[in-house]
Amino acid sequence: MRAGAPWVFSNEIAMKPEYRQFPPGGLVRVQGADDVRFGCFMFNPHSLIAARLLDRNQDAVIDQAWILSRVAAAVALRALVTDSFFYRLVHAEADGFPGLIIDRYDDVLVLQANTAGMDRLLPEISAALQNLLPVRAIVARNDSAARQHEKLPESVALLHGTDASVVVVEGGVKFPVDPMAGQKTGWFFDQKPNRDRVAAMAGGARVLDVFCHTGGFGLRCAGAGAAHVTLVDSSAPALEHARQTATVNEFSERVSMVRADAFETLTQLASAGEIFDIVVCDPPAFAKSKKDAGAGLRAYGRLARLAAPLVAPGGFLLMASCSHHAPLMEWAAQLAWGLHRARRDGKILFTGGAGPDHPVHPHLPESAYLKVQLLQLT
Ligand code: SAH
């Protein structure tokens, strides 16, 4: 806190027995032993991160007007940095709402409260959203694993409206999404700028989208005029969703699907002599904890080694990692190792992550989990 961080850990507090009786997510003011006043916080006596900063002003009143002004600031920022009404509207600490995610699907808003404090404020936040935006439905997707750290129950509920189904329109492609049921809040907004970037190069291309999930990357490429798109995923429901999306957009004759393990499929395609102009690998997190960071990082190297042979000379490889425990430089070193093992050279055209609708708190750089590299291979 003294250096600017927005969290206080439980072992940094002189935890009096009565503090343990405080309601999870209640408001507290935190003060140093030297009487320095740190501000206004949400407190959870059951969490390792015991206090999360709401306002550096010790006298702040966290009421409807306070919430409204923070949500309004988030809306105003997105109006400047996005080009549609489909984006992440609130990205937790960086937007001043510790542990709260809000995704905007035009007139449908999907909330995820990962802290007891935000869970308590959901009715007020929901009211602020209805005050500021045209709202058809509000969904609480409170089924994330992170809620367990705060001892919160998992649930999915419609807080407002009757029908939350939406069609995300990205780059002119229509993606039907069910925010009540899909992974995360239904759609991966974080990869939007990277899908834009790949789609921009996809005219006439043969595209391979590995770990495609519901086909975000591949179908954006189809929309941008790719000659053919091959989607690979091990999940039958994800591919069925992709198939329906291809049909809705009339791409079906240019899209084929493989339901299989990605590593095995890459090996098989290479031995069959298949070649693609663009290969996208956007796998699930391989390094889920500090403990498996080493093995996870090596899996990214292996993936690059298996993907590189499928890229045509002069073609493009987009590699992504959503692991919190895969630091950028170590991950990039794995990719370089993989390319070399595949006896391929290339150049990195772009290193990035999520877009500016996913701002990052300067003191929580590890929350920028998504890393992306776009390479051209020779
Ligand atoms: N690229 C996607 C998101 C990928 S999420 C998008 O832009 O929407 C990760 C996906 O990897 C999930 O759909 C999951 O089913 C799939 N997956 C996980 N392990 C796999 C494996 N071993 N082989 C193939 N697919 C796998």
Image (cartoon, rainbow, N blue to C red):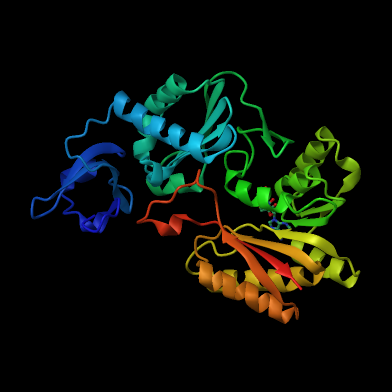
- Residue 187 lies in quadrant: top right
- Residue 270 lies in quadrant: bottom right
Q: Is residue 292 in sight in this rendering?
A: no
112 in relation to 9, above or below: above
Q: Nearer the viewer, residue 285 or 97?
A: 97
Residue at 71%, 55% (x, y): give it: 211
Q: Position of residue 266 (x, y in %)?
A: 80, 66
Quadrant containing the C terminus is bottom right
Horizontal relation, residue 5 to residue 248: left or right? left
Quadrant containing the N terminus is bottom left
Q: Nearer the viewer, residue 182 or 224?
A: 224
Residue at 30%, 24% (x, y): give it: 65
Q: How many marks?
A: 0
Horizontal relation, residue 290 to residue 93: left or right? right
Q: Position of residue 238 (x, y in %)?
A: 74, 45
Residue at 29%, 49% (x, y): give it: 50
Taking the image as four quarters, which one is ligand 1 found in?
bottom right
Q: Position of residue 28 (x, y in %)?
A: 21, 40
Q: Nearer the viewer, residue 127 or 68?
A: 68
Q: Position of residue 276 (x, y in %)?
A: 83, 62
173 in relation to 136, above or below: below
350 in relation to 138, above or below: below
Q: Is residue 226 in sight in this rendering?
A: yes
Horizontal relation, residue 100 to residue 35: left or right? right
